[in-house]
Amino acid sequence: MMLSAPSQLLERNIELFNDEGWLIINPADAYFTDRLTDLSLDVLHQYFDIYAESVRVIPCTILDSRDILTTQTGIFSDQKVGKHQHFFAPFLSTPQRYSNIVIYLPKAKAHYAMLIKMAASLVQQGGSIYVVGENKGGIKSASKLLSNLGHVDKVDSARHCSLLRCEVAQPQPDFDIQQSLSYFDIAVNGQEATIASLPGVFSHEELDEGTHLLLEKLPSSLRGGILDFACGAGIIGCLLKRQFPHLNISYLDVSALALYSTAHTLAESGLTGTLMAANGLHGVDEQFNHIVTNPPFHTGIKTDYTVTKRFIADAARLITSGGNLHMVANRFLPYPGLLAETFERVQTLAQTNRFSVYQAIKV
Ligand SMILES: C[S@@+](CC[C@H](N)C(=O)[O-])C[C@H]1O[C@@H](n2cnc3c(N)ncnc32)[C@H](O)[C@@H]1O
Protein backbone atom coordinates (compact mmCIF):
# COMPACT_ATOMS: atom_id res chain seq x y z
CA MET A 1 0.00 0.00 0.00
CA MET A 2 1.13 3.53 -0.81
CA LEU A 3 2.55 5.74 1.89
CA SER A 4 1.52 9.40 1.57
CA ALA A 5 4.35 11.81 0.68
CA PRO A 6 4.66 13.13 4.29
CA SER A 7 4.85 9.53 5.56
CA GLN A 8 7.57 8.75 3.00
CA LEU A 9 9.57 11.62 4.44
CA LEU A 10 9.06 10.28 7.97
CA GLU A 11 10.10 6.83 6.76
CA ARG A 12 13.40 8.29 5.49
CA ASN A 13 13.93 9.44 9.09
CA ILE A 14 12.74 6.26 10.77
CA GLU A 15 15.72 6.34 13.19
CA LEU A 16 13.93 9.19 15.01
CA PHE A 17 11.42 6.60 16.22
CA ASN A 18 13.88 4.57 18.29
CA ASP A 19 12.48 5.60 21.66
CA GLU A 20 9.08 5.09 23.23
CA GLY A 21 6.76 7.98 24.10
CA TRP A 22 5.51 9.08 20.67
CA LEU A 23 2.14 10.56 19.78
CA ILE A 24 1.28 10.82 16.09
CA ILE A 25 -1.46 13.30 15.16
CA ASN A 26 -3.58 12.88 12.01
CA PRO A 27 -1.43 10.52 9.93
CA ALA A 28 -2.34 10.98 6.27
CA ASP A 29 -2.46 7.22 5.70
CA ALA A 30 -2.94 4.05 7.71
CA TYR A 31 0.42 2.53 6.66
CA PHE A 32 3.18 4.59 8.26
CA THR A 33 2.42 3.13 11.70
CA ASP A 34 2.89 -0.36 10.18
CA ARG A 35 6.59 0.56 9.89
CA LEU A 36 6.68 0.99 13.69
CA THR A 37 5.07 -2.23 14.94
CA ASP A 38 7.80 -2.82 17.56
CA LEU A 39 7.26 0.57 19.18
CA SER A 40 4.52 1.42 21.71
CA LEU A 41 2.88 4.62 20.58
CA ASP A 42 -0.39 6.56 20.54
CA VAL A 43 -2.12 7.87 17.44
CA LEU A 44 -4.74 10.63 17.50
CA HIS A 45 -7.04 10.62 14.48
CA GLN A 46 -9.43 13.52 13.94
CA TYR A 47 -10.61 11.77 10.72
CA PHE A 48 -12.56 8.56 10.86
CA ASP A 49 -11.46 7.19 7.47
CA ILE A 50 -7.79 6.75 8.44
CA TYR A 51 -8.80 5.69 11.97
CA ALA A 52 -11.11 2.96 10.67
CA GLU A 53 -8.46 1.79 8.21
CA SER A 54 -5.80 1.77 10.94
CA VAL A 55 -7.85 -0.31 13.39
CA ARG A 56 -9.34 -2.40 10.57
CA VAL A 57 -12.58 -3.42 12.29
CA ILE A 58 -14.84 -0.43 12.90
CA PRO A 59 -17.12 0.46 9.98
CA CYS A 60 -19.10 3.28 11.70
CA THR A 61 -19.40 4.64 15.25
CA ILE A 62 -22.65 5.95 16.74
CA LEU A 63 -22.38 8.75 19.29
CA ASP A 64 -24.86 10.62 21.48
CA SER A 65 -24.45 14.41 21.34
CA ARG A 66 -24.83 14.59 25.15
CA ASP A 67 -21.81 12.31 25.67
CA ILE A 68 -19.78 14.47 23.34
CA LEU A 69 -20.58 17.58 25.38
CA THR A 70 -19.39 15.99 28.60
CA THR A 71 -16.29 14.15 27.40
CA GLN A 72 -13.25 14.92 29.56
CA THR A 73 -10.74 12.87 27.56
CA GLY A 74 -12.02 13.91 24.13
CA ILE A 75 -12.05 10.27 22.99
CA PHE A 76 -15.00 9.17 20.83
CA SER A 77 -13.62 5.71 20.11
CA ASP A 78 -10.34 3.91 20.75
CA GLN A 79 -8.77 0.66 19.75
CA LYS A 80 -5.48 -1.07 20.42
CA VAL A 81 -3.68 -2.67 17.47
CA GLY A 82 -0.56 -4.53 18.64
CA LYS A 83 1.51 -1.98 20.55
CA HIS A 84 -0.38 0.99 19.08
CA GLN A 85 -3.25 2.78 20.78
CA HIS A 86 -5.47 4.56 18.24
CA PHE A 87 -7.90 7.29 19.31
CA PHE A 88 -10.65 8.85 17.22
CA ALA A 89 -11.15 12.20 18.93
CA PRO A 90 -11.38 15.95 18.30
CA PHE A 91 -8.78 16.49 21.04
CA LEU A 92 -6.86 14.49 23.60
CA SER A 93 -6.75 15.34 27.27
CA THR A 94 -4.61 12.99 29.35
CA PRO A 95 -2.21 13.35 32.28
CA GLN A 96 0.36 11.48 30.15
CA ARG A 97 3.16 13.59 28.68
CA TYR A 98 4.77 12.44 25.42
CA SER A 99 8.48 12.79 24.74
CA ASN A 100 7.84 13.37 21.03
CA ILE A 101 4.81 14.37 18.99
CA VAL A 102 4.50 14.52 15.22
CA ILE A 103 1.71 16.52 13.58
CA TYR A 104 0.77 16.03 9.93
CA LEU A 105 0.17 19.58 8.69
CA PRO A 106 -3.57 20.16 8.07
CA LYS A 107 -4.92 22.37 5.28
CA ALA A 108 -6.41 25.17 7.39
CA LYS A 109 -4.03 27.47 9.24
CA ALA A 110 -6.42 27.89 12.19
CA HIS A 111 -6.66 24.10 12.50
CA TYR A 112 -2.87 23.88 12.61
CA ALA A 113 -2.70 26.62 15.26
CA MET A 114 -5.15 24.62 17.38
CA LEU A 115 -3.12 21.40 16.96
CA ILE A 116 0.07 23.20 18.00
CA LYS A 117 -1.60 24.39 21.22
CA MET A 118 -2.91 20.89 21.90
CA ALA A 119 0.46 19.25 21.18
CA ALA A 120 2.26 21.80 23.37
CA SER A 121 0.03 20.82 26.31
CA LEU A 122 0.78 17.11 25.73
CA VAL A 123 4.56 17.17 25.25
CA GLN A 124 6.90 16.88 28.22
CA GLN A 125 9.25 19.75 29.01
CA GLY A 126 12.37 19.32 26.87
CA GLY A 127 10.42 17.08 24.46
CA SER A 128 9.99 17.76 20.74
CA ILE A 129 7.12 18.60 18.43
CA TYR A 130 7.67 17.62 14.80
CA VAL A 131 5.58 18.89 11.91
CA VAL A 132 5.55 17.15 8.55
CA GLY A 133 3.79 18.52 5.50
CA GLU A 134 3.86 19.41 1.87
CA ASN A 135 5.89 22.50 0.95
CA LYS A 136 2.97 23.89 -1.04
CA GLY A 137 0.69 23.24 1.97
CA GLY A 138 2.25 26.19 3.82
CA ILE A 139 5.17 24.60 5.67
CA LYS A 140 6.97 27.99 5.78
CA SER A 141 4.24 29.68 7.79
CA ALA A 142 3.92 26.45 9.79
CA SER A 143 7.54 26.89 10.84
CA LYS A 144 6.86 30.47 11.93
CA LEU A 145 3.97 29.47 14.17
CA LEU A 146 5.93 26.56 15.63
CA SER A 147 8.78 28.90 16.53
CA ASN A 148 6.54 30.45 19.20
CA LEU A 149 7.33 27.33 21.23
CA GLY A 150 11.11 27.30 20.75
CA HIS A 151 13.87 27.03 18.18
CA VAL A 152 12.81 25.27 14.94
CA ASP A 153 15.15 23.10 12.80
CA LYS A 154 14.42 21.66 9.40
CA VAL A 155 15.24 17.97 9.90
CA ASP A 156 14.82 16.87 6.28
CA SER A 157 13.03 17.68 3.07
CA ALA A 158 12.16 15.42 0.13
CA ARG A 159 9.08 14.33 -1.87
CA HIS A 160 8.00 18.01 -1.95
CA CYS A 161 7.61 17.83 1.83
CA SER A 162 9.53 19.13 4.85
CA LEU A 163 9.99 17.80 8.36
CA LEU A 164 10.40 20.43 11.11
CA ARG A 165 11.37 19.92 14.73
CA CYS A 166 10.93 22.19 17.72
CA GLU A 167 12.23 21.42 21.20
CA VAL A 168 9.73 22.72 23.74
CA ALA A 169 11.88 24.05 26.55
CA GLN A 170 9.26 25.91 28.61
CA PRO A 171 6.23 24.44 30.39
CA GLN A 172 3.08 25.02 28.32
CA PRO A 173 -0.49 25.86 29.37
CA ASP A 174 -3.26 23.25 29.42
CA PHE A 175 -5.32 22.97 26.27
CA ASP A 176 -9.02 23.75 26.46
CA ILE A 177 -10.89 22.99 23.24
CA GLN A 178 -13.79 25.19 24.36
CA GLN A 179 -11.56 28.19 23.70
CA SER A 180 -11.20 27.14 20.05
CA LEU A 181 -14.97 26.97 19.47
CA SER A 182 -16.42 29.99 17.73
CA TYR A 183 -20.09 30.85 17.46
CA PHE A 184 -22.00 32.62 14.69
CA ASP A 185 -25.65 33.33 14.03
CA ILE A 186 -27.52 32.39 10.87
CA ALA A 187 -31.07 32.98 9.65
CA VAL A 188 -32.76 31.02 6.85
CA ASN A 189 -36.49 30.71 6.07
CA GLY A 190 -37.22 32.98 9.06
CA GLN A 191 -35.50 30.44 11.30
CA GLU A 192 -32.51 31.58 13.36
CA ALA A 193 -29.81 29.49 14.97
CA THR A 194 -26.44 29.87 16.63
CA ILE A 195 -23.81 27.62 15.07
CA ALA A 196 -20.73 26.37 16.93
CA SER A 197 -17.66 25.52 14.93
CA LEU A 198 -14.05 24.52 15.41
CA PRO A 199 -11.15 25.41 13.12
CA GLY A 200 -10.82 22.82 10.34
CA VAL A 201 -14.59 22.51 9.96
CA PHE A 202 -16.20 23.46 6.63
CA SER A 203 -17.50 27.04 6.36
CA HIS A 204 -15.96 27.84 9.73
CA GLU A 205 -17.68 30.97 11.06
CA GLU A 206 -20.04 31.49 8.09
CA LEU A 207 -22.95 29.90 6.26
CA ASP A 208 -21.91 28.47 2.88
CA GLU A 209 -23.80 29.88 -0.12
CA GLY A 210 -24.64 26.39 -1.42
CA THR A 211 -25.92 25.22 1.98
CA HIS A 212 -28.05 28.37 2.21
CA LEU A 213 -29.63 27.64 -1.18
CA LEU A 214 -30.31 24.01 -0.23
CA LEU A 215 -32.01 25.05 3.02
CA GLU A 216 -34.22 27.52 1.15
CA LYS A 217 -35.35 24.84 -1.29
CA LEU A 218 -36.05 21.93 1.08
CA PRO A 219 -39.75 21.07 0.99
CA SER A 220 -41.90 21.27 4.13
CA SER A 221 -43.16 17.75 3.40
CA LEU A 222 -40.08 16.03 4.92
CA ARG A 223 -41.06 13.40 7.48
CA GLY A 224 -39.62 10.58 9.58
CA GLY A 225 -35.92 9.81 9.75
CA ILE A 226 -33.49 12.22 8.12
CA LEU A 227 -29.76 11.86 7.63
CA ASP A 228 -27.71 15.07 7.49
CA PHE A 229 -24.85 13.51 5.52
CA ALA A 230 -21.47 15.27 5.75
CA CYS A 231 -22.98 17.50 8.44
CA GLY A 232 -19.99 19.76 9.14
CA ALA A 233 -21.03 22.00 12.04
CA GLY A 234 -24.55 20.54 11.90
CA ILE A 235 -26.15 23.55 10.21
CA ILE A 236 -28.60 21.71 7.93
CA GLY A 237 -29.95 19.26 10.52
CA CYS A 238 -30.15 21.84 13.27
CA LEU A 239 -32.16 24.29 11.15
CA LEU A 240 -34.45 21.49 9.95
CA LYS A 241 -35.07 20.31 13.51
CA ARG A 242 -35.87 23.86 14.63
CA GLN A 243 -38.28 24.30 11.73
CA PHE A 244 -39.85 20.82 11.90
CA PRO A 245 -39.45 19.48 15.47
CA HIS A 246 -41.17 16.16 14.58
CA LEU A 247 -38.24 15.09 12.38
CA ASN A 248 -35.81 12.50 13.69
CA ILE A 249 -32.42 13.67 12.52
CA SER A 250 -29.05 11.87 12.50
CA TYR A 251 -25.82 13.66 11.71
CA LEU A 252 -22.87 12.00 9.96
CA ASP A 253 -19.35 13.22 9.24
CA VAL A 254 -15.85 11.80 8.85
CA SER A 255 -14.37 14.54 11.03
CA ALA A 256 -14.34 14.46 14.83
CA LEU A 257 -13.99 18.26 14.76
CA ALA A 258 -17.23 18.45 12.76
CA LEU A 259 -19.07 16.05 15.10
CA TYR A 260 -17.86 17.93 18.18
CA SER A 261 -19.05 21.20 16.58
CA THR A 262 -22.42 19.63 15.70
CA ALA A 263 -22.99 18.51 19.31
CA HIS A 264 -22.36 22.10 20.43
CA THR A 265 -24.53 23.56 17.66
CA LEU A 266 -27.40 21.32 18.83
CA ALA A 267 -26.84 22.30 22.47
CA GLU A 268 -27.04 26.00 21.51
CA SER A 269 -30.58 25.28 20.28
CA GLY A 270 -31.45 23.09 23.28
CA LEU A 271 -31.36 19.99 21.04
CA THR A 272 -29.71 16.58 21.19
CA GLY A 273 -29.13 14.06 18.44
CA THR A 274 -27.53 10.88 17.17
CA LEU A 275 -24.17 11.49 15.56
CA MET A 276 -22.35 9.05 13.32
CA ALA A 277 -18.66 8.90 12.56
CA ALA A 278 -18.21 7.21 9.20
CA ASN A 279 -16.33 7.33 5.92
CA GLY A 280 -19.04 8.05 3.36
CA LEU A 281 -21.91 5.68 4.09
CA HIS A 282 -19.60 2.67 4.63
CA GLY A 283 -20.91 0.56 7.48
CA VAL A 284 -24.18 2.51 7.81
CA ASP A 285 -27.18 0.18 7.68
CA GLU A 286 -30.01 2.28 9.13
CA GLN A 287 -32.82 3.29 6.76
CA PHE A 288 -33.84 6.94 6.30
CA ASN A 289 -36.83 8.63 4.68
CA HIS A 290 -34.60 11.42 3.45
CA ILE A 291 -30.92 12.17 3.06
CA VAL A 292 -30.00 15.84 2.89
CA THR A 293 -26.48 16.94 1.99
CA ASN A 294 -23.92 19.42 0.79
CA PRO A 295 -21.49 16.58 0.05
CA PRO A 296 -17.70 16.68 0.10
CA PHE A 297 -16.18 17.49 -3.24
CA HIS A 298 -13.10 15.46 -4.05
CA THR A 299 -10.49 17.37 -5.98
CA GLY A 300 -7.56 15.84 -7.77
CA ILE A 301 -5.51 16.20 -10.90
CA LYS A 302 -7.97 13.99 -12.71
CA THR A 303 -11.57 14.38 -11.53
CA ASP A 304 -12.60 11.04 -10.18
CA TYR A 305 -16.28 10.31 -9.57
CA THR A 306 -15.80 6.86 -8.00
CA VAL A 307 -16.42 8.21 -4.48
CA THR A 308 -19.47 10.20 -5.62
CA LYS A 309 -20.92 7.21 -7.48
CA ARG A 310 -20.38 5.02 -4.44
CA PHE A 311 -22.13 7.59 -2.22
CA ILE A 312 -25.12 7.82 -4.58
CA ALA A 313 -25.47 4.03 -4.74
CA ASP A 314 -25.19 3.74 -0.93
CA ALA A 315 -27.72 6.57 -0.45
CA ALA A 316 -30.21 4.79 -2.70
CA ARG A 317 -29.72 1.61 -0.64
CA LEU A 318 -30.46 3.44 2.66
CA ILE A 319 -33.45 5.52 1.52
CA THR A 320 -36.87 3.92 2.04
CA SER A 321 -39.27 3.59 -0.91
CA GLY A 322 -40.94 6.93 -1.63
CA GLY A 323 -38.08 8.72 0.13
CA ASN A 324 -35.56 11.04 -1.47
CA LEU A 325 -32.14 12.62 -1.51
CA HIS A 326 -31.70 16.40 -1.54
CA MET A 327 -28.30 17.64 -2.50
CA VAL A 328 -26.60 20.90 -3.40
CA ALA A 329 -23.51 20.90 -5.60
CA ASN A 330 -21.43 23.05 -7.86
CA ARG A 331 -23.68 23.37 -10.92
CA PHE A 332 -20.92 22.29 -13.31
CA LEU A 333 -20.50 18.87 -11.72
CA PRO A 334 -22.31 16.11 -13.62
CA TYR A 335 -24.60 15.15 -10.74
CA PRO A 336 -27.87 14.96 -12.70
CA GLY A 337 -26.45 12.16 -14.89
CA LEU A 338 -24.82 10.36 -11.96
CA LEU A 339 -28.04 10.56 -9.90
CA ALA A 340 -30.15 9.37 -12.84
CA GLU A 341 -28.01 6.22 -13.14
CA THR A 342 -29.38 5.12 -9.74
CA PHE A 343 -32.56 7.03 -8.89
CA GLU A 344 -35.83 6.74 -10.77
CA ARG A 345 -36.61 10.46 -10.82
CA VAL A 346 -34.21 13.40 -10.62
CA GLN A 347 -35.26 17.05 -10.60
CA THR A 348 -33.34 20.32 -10.36
CA LEU A 349 -35.11 22.39 -7.69
CA ALA A 350 -32.96 25.52 -8.02
CA GLN A 351 -29.97 26.83 -9.88
CA THR A 352 -27.75 29.90 -9.44
CA ASN A 353 -24.63 30.76 -11.42
CA ARG A 354 -22.63 28.59 -8.98
CA PHE A 355 -24.89 25.94 -7.44
CA SER A 356 -27.70 23.53 -8.25
CA VAL A 357 -30.06 21.86 -5.81
CA TYR A 358 -31.19 18.38 -6.85
CA GLN A 359 -33.93 16.12 -5.59
CA ALA A 360 -33.56 12.43 -6.41
CA ILE A 361 -36.60 10.26 -5.65
CA LYS A 362 -36.62 6.55 -4.90
CA VAL A 363 -39.96 5.30 -6.20
C1 LIG B 1 -19.20 20.71 1.87
S1 LIG B 1 -19.03 20.28 3.57
C2 LIG B 1 -20.68 20.46 4.16
C3 LIG B 1 -20.79 20.73 5.64
C4 LIG B 1 -22.17 21.12 6.14
N1 LIG B 1 -23.18 20.15 5.80
C5 LIG B 1 -22.56 22.48 5.60
O1 LIG B 1 -23.35 22.51 4.66
O2 LIG B 1 -22.05 23.50 6.11
C6 LIG B 1 -18.71 18.59 3.45
C7 LIG B 1 -18.44 17.82 4.73
O3 LIG B 1 -18.09 16.49 4.33
C8 LIG B 1 -17.23 15.94 5.29
N2 LIG B 1 -16.57 14.79 4.65
C9 LIG B 1 -15.46 14.78 3.85
N3 LIG B 1 -15.17 13.53 3.47
C10 LIG B 1 -16.11 12.72 4.03
C11 LIG B 1 -16.33 11.32 4.02
N4 LIG B 1 -15.53 10.50 3.35
N5 LIG B 1 -17.37 10.83 4.72
C12 LIG B 1 -18.20 11.65 5.42
N6 LIG B 1 -18.03 12.99 5.48
C13 LIG B 1 -17.01 13.52 4.79
C14 LIG B 1 -16.32 17.08 5.67
O4 LIG B 1 -15.74 16.85 6.94
C15 LIG B 1 -17.31 18.27 5.65
O5 LIG B 1 -17.82 18.50 6.93
Image: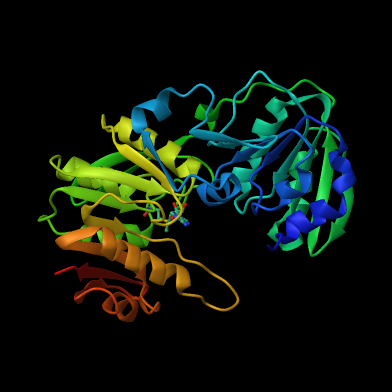
Q: Position of residue 131 (x, y in %)?
A: 76, 45
Residue 196 seen: no
Quadrant location of residue 123?
top right
Name the foreground residue: 262 vs 204. 262
Q: Is residue 71 above or below residue 115?
A: above
At horizontal 71% and vertical 43% (from top left) the residue drawn is 103
- Give the quarter of the figure containing the N terminus: bottom right
Residue at the outermost top position: 95
Residue 2 seen: yes
In the displayed structure, does residue 90 sit left or right of residue 239?
A: right
Quadrant location of residue 340?
bottom left
In the displayed structure, does residue 83 sit left or right of residue 307?
A: right
State ligand 1's quadrant.
Answer: bottom left
Q: Which color scheme does this rendered protein use? A: rainbow
At horizontal 38% and vertical 35% (from top left) the residue drawn is 63
Residue at the outermost left position: 221
Q: Is residue 300 above or below residue 213?
A: below
At horizontal 52% and vertical 29% (from top left) the residue drawn is 74
In the displayed structure, does residue 67 sit left or right of residue 190?
A: right
Name the foreground residue: 8 vs 318. 318
Q: How many marks?
A: 0
In the displayed structure, does residue 236 sit left or right of residue 361?
A: right
At horizontal 27% and vertical 49% (from top left) the residue drawn is 286
Q: Position of residue 361 (x, y in %)?
A: 18, 69
